[in-house]
Image (cartoon, grey):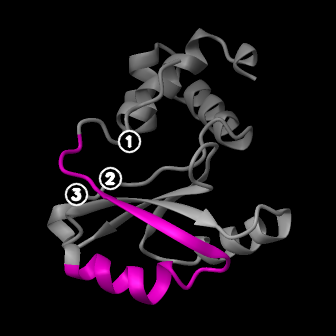
């Protein structure tokens, strides 16, 4: 898919990834195209799925979600049905930021933001271990976020 993108498209994507608040006029100026061309090309990038969405990056501590937790999950069965059931239920949990099917010692890794350890303990007891098919969880409290939500290199 990347082969369909020219240098202008790639530059637009890099700039938007760095600052999604750029106006069309600012983006056009930085890329070196007319505002009309920029708007058409930006719309095409959205329509073709190169830009999945635009959102604000909220500072977790400012909204009382300063504790980052990674949870490894092992299911009791490795079947398409058990995976589908777990995924549907995990996707409904508001505390889950990311849910990834992985290879290795765990079936899934969940990225969760909470206020503190007490908050996580409640969520773990009420929601996580109640997810369909969960046999075991292993919790990792993040001590320092070195890189988080870094921009894609392309």
Q: Is residue 127 left or right of residue 146?
A: right
Residue at left offset 62%, top offset 55%: 107
Residue 25 seen in the figure = no
Question: Which residue is tagged 1?
Answer: 149
Question: Are the two marked residues, 2 and 3, in contact with CB atoms closer than 8 angstroms?
Answer: yes
Residue at the spot of label 2: 57
Local packing at callout 3 (Cα closer than 10 Å; few below 14, some 14-19, many 20+) is few
Residue 133 in magenta stretch:
yes
Q: Residue 24 placed where, x, y %?
A: 46, 36
Tell me the distance, in whole angstroms, between the alpha carbons under discs 2 and 3.
7 Å
Residue 77 visible in the displayed image: yes
Circle 2 Cα neighbour tier, 10 Å, few/some/many (<14 / 14–19 / ≥20): few
Q: Residue furthest right?
A: 80
Judged left or right of residue 108, residue 11 is left
Q: Nearer the viewer, residue 80 or 154?
A: 80
Query: Looking at the picture, does residue 149 appear above or below residue 117?
Result: above
Q: Which mark is residue 38?
A: none
From the top left corner, tell me how far across and down residue 67 is, in percent: 22, 63
Q: Are marks 2 and 1 in contact (CB under 8 Å)?
A: yes
| Region rendered in magenta | 118-145
Q: Secondary structure at mark 2?
A: loop
Question: Residue drawn at (32%, 86%), measured in percent from left and top?
Answer: 122
54, above or below 8, in the image: below
Q: Which residue is mark 3?
A: 59
Callouts 1 and 3 close, C-beta under 8 Å: no
Badge 3 marks a residue whose secondary structure is: loop
Numbered circles on residues, count = 3
Given this view, does label 2 or label 1 mark the residue nearer the observer? 1
Q: Which residue is rendered at x = 59% and y = 20% of the image?
A: 9
Give the CA distance from mark 2 to mark 1: 9 Å
Q: Please name the residue shown 74% across and 65% down the image.
A: 83
Expressed as whole percent of the image width and height from the top left, the position of residue 51 reads 59, 40
């Amino acid at each position: 898919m990347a082969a369909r993108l020219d240098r202008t498209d790639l530059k637009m994507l890099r700039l938007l990834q760095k600052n999604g608040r750029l106006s069309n006029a600012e983006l056009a100026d930085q890329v070196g195209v007319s505002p009309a061309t920029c708007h058409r090309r930006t719309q095409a990038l959205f329509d073709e799925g190169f830009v999945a969405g635009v959102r604000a990056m909220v500072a977790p501590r400012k909204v009382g979600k300063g504790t980052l937790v990674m949870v490894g999950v092992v299911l009791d069965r490795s079947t398409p049905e058990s995976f589908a059931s777990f995924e549907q239920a995990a996707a409904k949990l508001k505390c889950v930021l990311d849910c990834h099917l992985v290879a290795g010692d765990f079936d899934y890794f969940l990225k969760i933001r909470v206020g503190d350890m007490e908050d996580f303990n409640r969520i773990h007891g009420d929601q996580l271990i109640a997810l369909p098919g969960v046999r075991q969880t292993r919790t990792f409290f993040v001590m320092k976020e070195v890189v988080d939500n870094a921009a894609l290199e392309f």
